[in-house]
Image (cartoon, grey):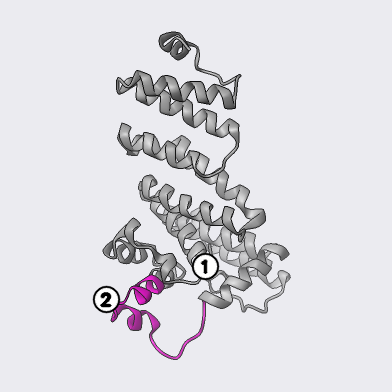
Amino acid sequence: MVQDYYSLLGVKQTASTRDIKKAFRERAKQLHPDIAGKDAEEAMRRLIAAYEVLSDRDRRCQYDQAYSRFIKKISFDYRTFLRERPDDPVSQAKLVVFELFHFEEDAAIEVWQKNGGLEFRMEQYLDREDWMDCVYVLAEELDKRDRAYEALMLLADLIREERRRPYYKQHMEDIETYVKELVRLRLKNQVDADTWVGCMETLLDLGFSPRDEARWMRSMAETLLRMGEESAAESIIREALQRDPGLPRTTQMRKKLKV
């Protein structure tokens, strides 16, 4: 979630809201498609994200807390220092963070992958808040690269930790919405049936609403039915209907399973 928004806008951390607005307008003109072309679309997206955070007092305050941890002026090449310690998991976890928050997303993913991907338990090597911010950004970047399964697994870990002890608080609703969008729009086309069922089981363990759970269970039952596992499908759809008796798109399945 934390990237160097001040550098992106070309302002100091002490900049006023007026300075931030002025800097945004100037940079937005430079990145306009008529001037910079379509190649500037990603840069414009980042610029807008930076402006939306820094122009909002509450969001800027929260950002500044994380900024002080991640974006520091240092007297040596910190990236090289970390890269020269490939066998030190602490350094490698910090390198993932460093690359992510300095707009080197591909490099961050490469480091994460080399260290085991989902098996690289970065929470063991980072402060809790650093890990949570890192996981969120990493999941977003994986999702952009059509790696929705890995993104979901990371976000599931984040949500479990958030349920245990809140950190994101008022922003958690946005994270939950993002997870549901990822599952609804992208995940299914990227995984096989067995993996899809496993993902639905993961979602059911995260404490979403009964309505959300019922819809995921319906999808599980539909998948299990196509796999020829009628008994399991029947059990799941019965449980789904207990959570949401008015669950739509179940008529044909209920007839087939005699539910």
Nearer to me, 183 or 74:
183
Image point 52% across, 40% down: which residue? 180
Please tell me how many numbered marks the rendered image carries. Answer: 2
On the image, numbered disc 2 is attached to which residue? Answer: 87
Tell me the crowding category of disc 2: few under 14, some 14 to 19, or many 20 or more residues within 10 angstroms, Cα based. Answer: few
Image point 35% across, 18% down: which residue? 230
- Above/below status of 214 relative to 135: above
Image coords of residue 55 (percent x, y): 68, 64
Tell me the crowding category of disc 1: few under 14, some 14 to 19, or many 20 or more residues within 10 angstroms, Cα based. Answer: some
Nearer to me, 127 or 152:
127
Q: Residue 219 carries which label?
A: none
Image coords of residue 212 (percent x, y): 56, 33
- The residue type indicated by label 1 comes to Arg
Q: Residue 128 carries which label?
A: 1
- The residue type indicated by label 2 comes to Asp
In the rendered image, residue 77 lying in the magenta stretch gets the answer: yes
Q: Is mark 2 on a helix, strand or loop?
A: loop
**Separation of disc 2 and disc 1 at Cα?**
22 Å
Image point 71% across, 74% down: which residue? 16
Image coords of residue 133 (percent x, y): 51, 63
- Report whether residue 188 is seen: yes
Magenta-colored span: 71-95
Q: What element carries label 1?
A: helix
Q: Which of marks 2 and 1 is nearer the N terminus?
A: 2
In the rendered image, residue 96 lying in the magenta stretch gets the answer: no
Indicate the quadrant where residue 6 lies: bottom right
